[in-house]
Amino acid sequence: KDERGRYRTVGLPLMLAGTGLDLASTYHVMRQGGHEANPLYGREASFGKVAAINAGIAAGIALALDRVAKKHPKAATLAAASIGGVRGAVAARNLMFDKE
């Protein structure tokens, strides 16, 4: 029996929503002349580079957690939801730098 239902219906959507909010807020700040603060991207990183790296990381985490969810669905759901919450908090922090 496949036990990944809650991970796929709760955890994964929360993680992807947090990632989307982070990217949207980063885009907003960059359009106002700000920059990505994460030193891994470099100070002059384009939004395309930031989005591509984020998409790759999110996809890798989602696939890894999907495998974990086969045997440990609660742990995978909690991990994904936690990641989503952290990414949402990062989005909120990004908007503190809003220049409008």
Image: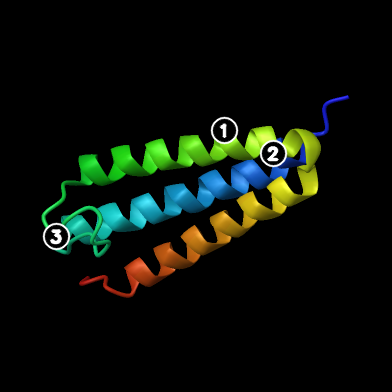
Q: Secondary structure at mark 3?
A: loop
Q: Which residue is mark 3?
A: 43
What's the CA distance linking mark 2 and mark 3? 35 Å
Q: Which residue is mark 2?
A: 68
Q: Who comes first in sequence, dot 1 or dot 3?
A: 3
Q: Who comes first in sequence, dot 2 or dot 3?
A: 3
Other-residue count near label 2 (Cα within 10 Å), few / some / many at <14 / 14–19 / ≥20: some
Tell me which amino acid carries mark 1.
Leu
User: Which corner quadrant holds the C terminus?
Assistant: bottom left
Other-residue count near label 1 (Cα within 10 Å), few / some / many at <14 / 14–19 / ≥20: few
Q: Which residue is mark 1?
A: 63
Q: Who comes first in sequence, dot 1 or dot 2?
A: 1
Tell me which amino acid carries mark 2.
Val
Q: Does the rendering let one see residue 4?
A: no
Tell me which amino acid carries mark 3.
Arg
Q: Secondary structure at mark 2?
A: helix
Horizontal side of residue 26 vs 6, given as left or right: left
What's the CA distance linking mark 1 and mark 3? 29 Å
